[in-house]
Amino acid sequence: MKKILLVPIMMLAALCLAVLPGCGGPSVEDLIRQDLTEQLDEIKEGGDDFLDEIVEASGEDFQTLGIDAKEFAKAYLDGFDYSIGDISVDDKTATATVDITIKSLQDIMNNFQTQFADQLGSLDLSAQEDEQGLYTMAGEVLMQVVQEAQPRTVTCNLPYSCDDEGVWSEDDAAETELMNALFS
């Protein structure tokens, strides 16, 4: 009698294990972690689609300096990494703590200005420098500065919220915080 009851109970237990994860779905923390991973992996991997977006956004600025925008982006993102820490959920809001390791664009621009000014100071001002030659020199200095820059880690607190239909998404403030980290 015990053996007869044991088989249906084992089958029920196996069915519950197979069905419950599908019915319950991933936790809010898992959904947010997956969303962040997808976004940040796209940056980390530096795929062609992502690099094409950077090229498109840069317009002709890099071309004027004689810089390939994709090469600039690759040099800038060299050393990019991230670590998703705690994700705290409180009813219909959540906050994900993410450490992002990236080169400081602000430091790059400051170093570029200093090094370019030094190079301009060493030029013979009596000689006629053509405008394109100066742009090319600026591009070379900028690429050197980007390649030499060292990544640093910035901690971001990215807010998420749940709408009335139960769908979780990043708040606008999360995008702003992420952009600040990427371009600070």
Image (spheres, helix red, strand yellow):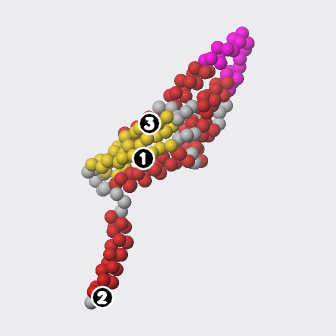
Q: Which residues are magenta?
A: 117-136
Q: CA distance from mark 2 to mark 1?
A: 49 Å
Please say if 145 is above or below 47.
Answer: above
- Residue 26 is situated, as x and y percent measured from the top left of the image, at 37, 60
Please identify the residue farthest to the right as the structure is shown: 127
Specify whether 7 is left or right of 127.
Answer: left
In the rendered structure, does residue 61 fall within the stretch colored magenta?
Answer: no
In terms of secondary structure, where does tag 1 sit? Answer: strand
Query: Nearest the camera: 131 or 124?
Result: 124
Which quadrant holds the N terminus?
A: bottom left
In terms of secondary structure, where does tag 3 sit? Answer: strand
Give the amino acid type for the residue marked by disc 3 in the picture: Val
- Residue 7 is situated, as x and y percent measured from the top left of the image, at 33, 84
Q: Give the foreground label among 2 and 1.
A: 2
Give the amino acid type for the residue marked by disc 1 in the picture: Ile
Which residue matches tag 2? 4
Q: CA distance from mark 3 to mark 1?
A: 12 Å
Examine the rendering and report whether any part of residue 55 can be seen: no
Which residue matches tag 1? 84
Specify whether 72 is left or right of 5.
Answer: right
Give the amino acid type for the residue marked by disc 2 in the picture: Ile
Examine the rendering and report whether any part of residue 130 can be seen: yes
Query: Which residue does the image show at 52% across and 48% down from the upper left?
Result: 42
Query: Which residue does the image show at 58% across and 48% down from the upper left?
Result: 47
Which numbered disc flags the more N-terminal residue, 2 or 1?
A: 2
| Label 2 Cα neighbours within 10 Å, binned few <14 / some 14-19 / many ≥20 | few
Which residue matches tag 3? 154
Which numbered disc flags the more N-terminal residue, 3 or 1?
A: 1
Q: CA distance from mark 3 to mark 2?
A: 61 Å
